[in-house]
Image: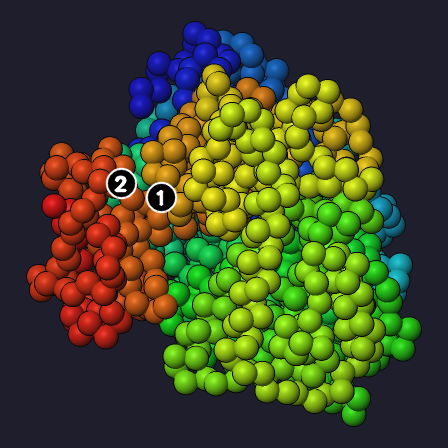
Amino acid sequence: MDKNQNFGGSFARKLKGALWQFRNDTDASFVAPEADYVSRLYFPLMNEAGMKCSVTPELKGDIASSFAHYLTPATGTEELHRNMSNRNFWICVEGKQPWSVSGNSALQRANKWTEAKDYSEVEGHLGCFKLIRESKETGIRAESSIFVPATDDLVEVMLVRIKNISDQEMKLTATAATPVFARHPDNFRDHRQVTSMFQKAESRKHGVEVRPTIVHDEKGHSINTTSYFVLGFEADGSAPEDIWSSLNDFIGEGGSLDNPEALSRKLKPAQNQDILASGREAIGAFRFAEKSLKAGETVHYIVLHGIKEKGQNPDHWIKEYGNLQSCKNQLDKTLKHWQEVSGQVLFETADKNFDQWMRWVAFQLKCRQIFGNSFLPDFGYGRGGRGWRDLWQDLLSIFLIDPAGARNEIINNYRGIRIDGSNATIIGNEPGSFVADRNNVARSWCDHGSWPLFVTEFYLHQSGDYDMLLQELPYWKDKFTHRSRKTDELWKEDQGTQQKDEDGNVYQGSILEHILLQQLSAFYNVGEHNNLLLEGADWNDTLDMAREKGESVCFHNFYGYNFGALAEILQQLKEKGTGSIKINEESLILLDSLNPATAIDYQKPEAKQKRLNEYFDQVQHQLSGKKVDVDIDSLIQDLLAKRHHIREHIRENEWISSGENEGFFNGHYDNNAQPVHGFKKDEIIIDLTSQVMPLMCETATKEQAKMAHKAAIKHLGDKESGGLRLCSEFKEIDLNIGRITGFVYGFKEHGSKWMQQNIMFMYGLYKRGMYDEAYDLFKDIYQINTDSAHAKTFPGIPSYFEPGNRGSYAYLTGSSAWMMLTVLTQMFGLRGYHGNLMLKPALHPEFFDQKGLAAVKTAFQGIQLHFSIHNPKRIDPKNITEMNLKINGQEAANQSAEKNCFIVAKSQLEDLCTQNINELELCIN
Ligand code: G1P
C-alpha cells in the first residue's frame, strides 16, 4: 500500500472505500489504513489460559483475566471516544512536543482533522494487532504490536518499534503509561472511590504492581489475592529509569492522560510514589533512558500487562517476554498457534478472499469459547458467564475444530438441566458451575431445551459415539421448580445443587433421560392455541413480555423436529443392541401413549398442562430414585406420535395465506393470546426466525417452504443491498409482546439484518435442497459482511447490520458457528452420517477454480482429510447425477442410494486413510 497516497488530501475515511484488505493470499492478515477514522472498531486478543483483551486503533480497550479481574477500566463502546485511558506510549523528541504512538495526545487530537495529522494504519493478524503510526513533524514511525502470548500466562505484551524517519540524528525518551484499575468492573460506577482506598501500589524494578487489600462485595467482602502489573523493558532487558505508580503525580494536578504534566514539563516522579498511589488511583507509567537515534535507526521497547495470583512470582515473565529476542520468539509462537487454530478447517476455492475471510470466522469461534458474550466493548451486558443457547450452538462447529474437547463440554453442560426439563441459563467456567439467571429473575426460555438435542444429534452423526447417551449424570437443583413458576420451599442451599432422591442420594440419570425430559417438558407446556408457551422469551430475547399467554410457534417447530431426531437416535441404539431404556419412574406419565390408561388427547392444551403439572408436583423436591425399563420400540412410537402431532398442528393452524400461492408462518402469540404475525391494519407482519424454523425443522411442506422463502424475500428483503431483516416493523410499542417493539426499527432484534437468522435460513435452504435460493442468500450475506466501507468492522461476522449496513456487535456472535457449519457441511457437503462419512456437495459452480477444483482441509473423527471436489463441467449441484470418489487413489464404495450423495462406511474410511493427510477426490461427472 502506498502510504503517501493517504497523506494530505481528504481526511475522512468514508471517501476512501474499503476499511481493510487482505495483505496476501495465505495468512489472512489484513491492512486497514487510517482505521482510527472509524469509531467503535475493536479487535480481540486472548489466550486459552483466559486472558481477555480488546484493543482499538487508538490502543484503547481493556485488559482482563476474568469478569472480576480487570487490569484496566472496563471499556464499553461508548467509552471509547469519551475517555482518554489507553495503553499509551509516548515519545519525547528533543525540541518537539510529546508524541503518542497511539495518537492519544491533546495535540494529535487537535490535528486530527488538519493537514498536520499523523498517518496511521492497522495490521490485523490472527493473534496480533499492529498499529503503525507516523509523524513527519516528529520524524518518527512507531509500530506497536500487541498480542496475548499463546502460553499459560495471563499477560498481554506490547512490543514497540520506534524508527527515526527524519534525515537527522535525534535524541528521544520513551514513556509508557497505562492507568491501572485492578478490580471488578462493577466498581467503575459502584463505590469507585471507596474501592480505590483498598489499592496498594508498589514500584518494582521494571514497573508497578497494584494489589488491592479487599474485594468489595456488600454481600460479604473478601481478601483480595490478585496482583496487577505493568512492566517495561528495553530490547536488552534493561529496566526503565523513572517509575510512576501515582496517576495524579504523573498527570499532575489539573492534568489529563492526553497531556500529562510529567511529560510536558519533563518532571521526575515524586520520591514517595507508592505512598502517593496507595489508596488512590494508580498508573503503571515509566520513562526509559534517553537514546540517540541516527536517521533510519530503530529502537525497541516492551510493555507487559499482567495479572497474577498472590505468591506467584512474576520473574519468569521477565525471562519469557522481557527482552527483544524472547519477545519476538513468543510473538512468532503465538502467530503460529493462531494460524493452526484458524486453519483446522481450511477452504480452497476460486475466491481467495473468501478462503481467508473464513479463517476469521474460525477465529471467531474461538473468541466465543473464551469471551462468551462479555468483555469486548459492544458486549456491555455480559457478566462473564456463557449463555445456555449460545454455548450449545457454538459446539456445532467446535466439533469441526476440536471434537475431543467438545465431547467433554457436551457432557458437562448436560449437568445444568433440572429434573423439570428446564435448565440453568448461565454456565461458569468451572465444570458444574451454573447460575439460574444472570439477573436473578426467575424465568425459563422456551427454546433452551431444544438446542442440546439438536447439537447432540449432530455430534452423534459426526462421531457415531452413541454410547455417550447412556452415560449417567446428575441433574441441577436450585429452589426453582415447575419451569420456574414455583419454588421448592423444602430446598435449602446447604442441600447442594444436585438433585437428590428420597434417601438423600444424588440422583443420576442417563444423558438420554436428560434429553427426553427436556423435550417432554416442552411438549406439554402449551398455551391455549396448543403451541409451546413462550415463557421468558425464545431465541429472540426481546419477545420478553408475553410470559403468561404468549406462545412460540417458532420453537414449537424445533421440538417437533427433535422428537423425530430422538426416535432416529433410538433406532440406532436399537440396531446396536439396546432393547430398553431406563428412566425415572415419575417421568413415565409423560410418555403417555405407552399405557392406554394414561394416553391423553393432544388436541387439548389443558390436558397437556394438567399432565405436566402432575409430573412437576411429583418431582418438585426429590425423586423416588426408582427407575423403570421402557421398551425401545414403544418409546420410539411415542416420540413419533408427538413429532407427527406438532408438525400437523403447525402446518394446518399456523399457516397464513397471503394470496394465491403466497403465504408464511405465524411465529408467536402475544400475552393476550393473539397471533403476532399476519395482516394487521392491511399490513403484513412477518418474522424471519418463524420462517427459518419450519424450514429447517422440516415442518413446512415443500410448497410451504417455497412460499415462506418467497414471502421472506418480499417482505423482509433489503431491495438495495441484500440480506433479510429479522422482522417487519412494529409501529406501536406493545408491552404484551416485549421490548422488541420499543427499539427503533432497523436496530437489534427489531428489523436489523440479523446474521444468525440469515445464515440459519441459508442453512435451512441448503438442507431442503433449495440450492439456488440458498446461494443467493449466501452472496448477500458475504457481500454485506465484506463490504467493509459500510460494515466498518474488521473481517468476520458481526451480530447484525444496522441501517446503512454498519456492522454491530462484532466477533461474539453465534453466526460464526452457523457459517462454518453451513459452508462445510452443506456447501461442501462434508458431514457425518451415523458415524460414517457423508459427502453431498451443494457448491455453486462459481466456487470452482479454472481447473474446476474446490477443496477443504479438515478432520473427520481424528482423520486428517484433504477433500477436493472436481467439477470440470461446472455442473450445478441440483443437476448432479453421477459422482465417484477416490481415497488416496483408491476407488471407494458408495453406501448411499442417492445420486448426489456419497456415503463412505467408517470401516472403509479407516482402511483407506493410511496417510497423515488423506486425499479424498470426489469427481462430479
Ligand atoms: C444474540 C444472543 C442470543 C440471542 C440472539 C437473539 O445472538 O447471543 O442468545 O438468542 O442474540 O436475541 P447472536 O446472533 O448475536 O449470536
The image quarter containing residue 581 is: bottom right
Judging depth in this view, the residue of 113 and 895 nearest the camera is 895
Residue 481: x and y in percent read 81, 68
On residue 408, which mark appears?
none
Judging depth in this view, the residue of 33 and 450 nearest the camera is 450
Q: Residues within 10 Å of mark 1 (few under 14, many from 20)?
A: some
Residue at 77% x, 37% y: name it.
674
Rendered view: 173 above or below 237: above
Three-letter code for the amino acid on which mark 1 is drawn: Gly
Q: Is residue 179 left or right of residue 117?
A: right
Q: Is residue 271 left or right of residue 488?
A: left
Q: Secondary structure at mark 2?
A: helix
The image quarter containing residue 446 is: bottom right
Rendered view: 12 above or below 610: above
* Image quarter (top left, top right, bottom left or bottom right) of the C terminus: top left
Three-letter code for the amino acid on which mark 2 is drawn: Lys
Residue 888: x and y in percent read 12, 63
Residue at 49% x, 28% y: name it.
661
Q: Earlier in the sequence, mark 2 or mark 1?
A: 1
Q: Which residue in the protein does label 1 denote?
A: 769
Judging depth in this view, the residue of 380 and 389 nearest the camera is 389
* Image quarter (top left, top right, bottom left or bottom right) of the N terminus: top left
Q: Which residue in the protein does label 2 denote?
A: 878
Rendered view: 163 above or below 186: above
**Residue reaching furthest right?**
489
* CB atoms of marks 2 and 1 within 8 Å: yes
**Residue reaching furthest top?**
9
Q: Is residue 425 left or right of residue 858?
A: right
Residue at 48% x, 32% y: name it.
707
Judging depth in this view, the residue of 242 and 355 nearest the camera is 355
Question: How far is the residue under mark 2 from the one under mark 1?
Answer: 8 Å
Q: Residues within 10 Å of mark 2 (few under 14, many from 20)?
A: some
